[in-house]
Amino acid sequence: MREFIVEADGGSRGNPGPAGYGSVVIDAATGETLMERAEYIGVATNNVAEYRGLLAGLRAAHELDPAASVHVRMDSKLVVEQMSGRWKIKHPDMKPLALEAGRVYPADQVTYEWIPRESNKHADRLANEAMDAGKRGERWSAADSTAELDAAASSARRGAVEVLGGGAAEAGAGVVGASGDAVAGAAKVRAALGSAAAGASRSASGASSAGGSSRRGAVEVSGGGAAGAEADVRAAKVVASPGWAPADMGAPATFVLLRHGETPLTPQKRFSGSGGTDPSLSDVGREQAERVAAALARRGTVQEILASPLTRTRETAAAVAERLGLEVTVEDGLRETDFGAWEGLTFAEVRERYPDDLNTWLSDPDAEPTGGGESFAATATRIAATRDKLVAAYAGRTVLLVTHVTPIKTFVRLALGAPPESLFRMELSAASLSAVAYYADGNASVRLFNDTSHLRP
């Protein structure tokens, strides 16, 4: 029995917005690309485009051999989990597409695997080419595809430079050099770079949701043979390591940090942690959740949603998930600090009742709130462990973490390498957005902090 690998992707520039998909069928035994499919599909959501990509890939494989076994690889956890039968399909636009995809092959001939976005560049490139063609009023053509150059270009890639500006990190230019096996094909790689430039990581503020990186251009390489390739390597290293940071190691794990909407305790500025009454959102909080959901849908970058187990965060996450057509995963590590006996009290009331405990707490991160609450040092240890787990699980993806004041401030503090007392110098409004990007080389950058522009009428 023949075995095929189908890699598929889809994206929407607006979510919903102009959308397209890309699919590739690969011979599992030889690694040879057997067939490519891509199409501009008009206005659609990310998830619909991803399902259309899956369907096209399965149909292409079926044309080659209806009896083959097929292993589908996609960077959409939603599609993989739904088609594997582990998640329910609730969105009305996706149900018929999923049913249609399930009918192409018998279920026992198809398996599904989630892969990082960085491992899905071929299909990603095709989806972007299809959308680019649609923007020009043209149809995508396999003859014009640059996707076959991915293998040569990726072996030469050295990383990207991040450029910070306007309160958010813009993706830097792709930095490319040739080495190893790529030396022999350096001329081909150099010729390809102009049109197949390796894009840098997408901005958390939503530069592109097209299932791939926004293209910013590439370092031009020149010369021929091994000497030219060596020069390319030296140039890439200079650009990628300008003296203040090591080279970027690829697309980061980007955490978009959303504080929950208001509860009845929020405008009263009362301590509300994980040890209190677990309040629900107020009417204002529910409206805030709807506004931020609409804003995130317009940005179109979020691929996964995780939430603290507390009611207010789960309600906020549910509003976003419904708009984006995603599922919510509860992550206990994102819960708020336990403020012990201070739960439900204002700062002034704590000052009046527990002055010594409060003064110690304000000056010592190891100090616990009265009654055995959680210290800021303990919270930081928990958040760091949660961060490390999620960075490993979501490398190259953009994940919405719906959480609370202290966890968000702690994510930002740790990313900046700031001291514990910096927590008291940060303002964080209800339903505000922040973002931190984590790179494989260990670096992190705060891209956005306390953005509430989406809440304005």
Image (cartoon, helix red, strand yellow):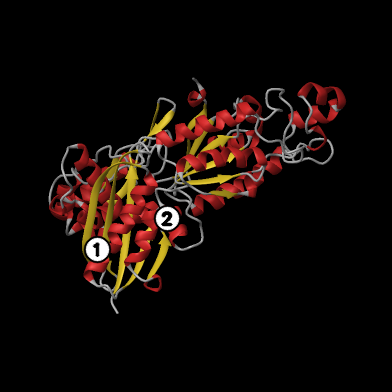
Indicate the quadrant containing the N terminus: top left, top right, bottom left or bottom right.
bottom left
User: Residue under circle 1?
Assistant: 60
Q: Residue 148 in the image: x percent, y percent? A: 20, 56
Q: Is residue 27 left or right of residue 109?
A: left
Q: Nearer the viewer, residue 187 or 277?
A: 277
For label 2, the SS is helix
> What element does badge 1 sit on?
helix
- Picture quarter containing residue 338? top right
Lower sequence index among marks 1 and 2:
1
* Residue 219, position as x, y percentages in the image: 23, 40
For the residue pair 24 and 122, the one nearer the viewer reads as: 24
Give coordinates of residue 24: x percent, y percent: 26, 59
Q: Position of residue 420 (x, y in %)?
A: 65, 34
Circle 1 packing at 10 Å, graded few (<14), some (14-19), many (20+), is: many
Dot 2 alpha-carbon crowd within 10 angstroms: few under 14, some 14 to 19, many 20 or more? many
Does residue 287 appear in this view?
yes
Please report the residue visible at 74 percent of the width from the left and 27 percent of the height from the top.
270
Tell me the distance, in whole angstroms, between the alpha carbons under discs 1 and 2. 18 Å
Which residue is identified by label 2? Answer: 79
In the rendered view, does 164 fall on the left or right side of 415?
A: left
Above or below 55: residue 16? above
Q: Residue at x 14, y 54 (%)?
A: 225
**For residue 369, above or below residue 24:** above
Q: Residue most toward the bottom?
A: 1
Image quarter of residue 31? bottom left
Image point (17%, 57%), residue name: 185
Q: Label 1 is placed on what type of residue?
A: Ala
Answer yes or no: is residue 249 visible.
no
Q: Amino acid at mark 2?
A: Val
Q: Along the line of sight, which residue is nearer the eye, 8 or 380?
A: 8
Left or right of 135? Residue 403 is right
